[in-house]
Amino acid sequence: MLSHLFICFFNDGSFIQQTEEDISTIDPVRSAFYDVAQRPNDVVLFCVVGNGHNYTVDLRDGHFEIDGVRFDARPDMPDDDCEYRLIYFRRHKQIVIQGKDGEHSIKYHIGWQTTINGKNYQQIISF
């Protein structure tokens, strides 16, 4: 069971909301993020909600929000008018000791990347 679920909003006003089953509506053997990955250039907002918190990356201007508090975490870049691409992944850490499950944790990561004059810039927040 996932502790955090995403909602992805597209530039045409449509959205994809991940459910606890985490199944793609396009290909039922894949995860819900597969549906987002089919429209990478259309993503405007990507939100991850869980444990009473809401984490958002806005790909229109690169800002982030945590629980509605907006902040800009862009590195020094030569151009403010650029195209941001979504970064989203989970890291699952599980420790197994002598065949028994031990500590386990999941960290979520959202952010963006862009390329300006051949140089890659990216910013990610983790929770």
Image: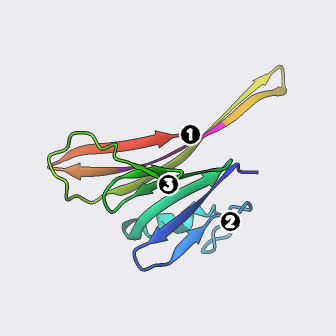
Instruction: Name the secondary structure under disc 3.
Output: loop
The residue under the point 68% across, 47% down is 51
Q: Is residue 96 above or below residue 109?
A: above
* Label 1 Cα crowd, 10 Å radius (few <14 / some 14-19 / many 20+): few
- x, y (%) of residue 117? 14, 49
Other-residue count near label 2 (Cα within 10 Å), few / some / many at <14 / 14–19 / ≥20 = some
Q: Amino acid at mark 3?
A: Gly
Amino acid type at mark 1: Phe
Q: Residue at x 36, y 67 (%)?
A: 41
Residue 92 in picture, x, y percent from top left: 64, 38
Mark 2 or 3, nearer chain start: 2
Residue that mark 1 sits on? 127
Residue indicated by mark 3 = 68
Please say if 98 is above or below 29.
above
In the rendered image, residue 111 lying in the magenta stretch gets the answer: yes
**Callout 1: SS:** loop
Q: Which mark is residue 23?
A: 2
Closest to the observer, 81 or 26: 81
**In this rendering, the label closer to the viewer, 2 or 3:** 3
Please name the predominant secondary structure of the magenta segment in the image. Answer: strand
Give the image quarter of residue 95: top right
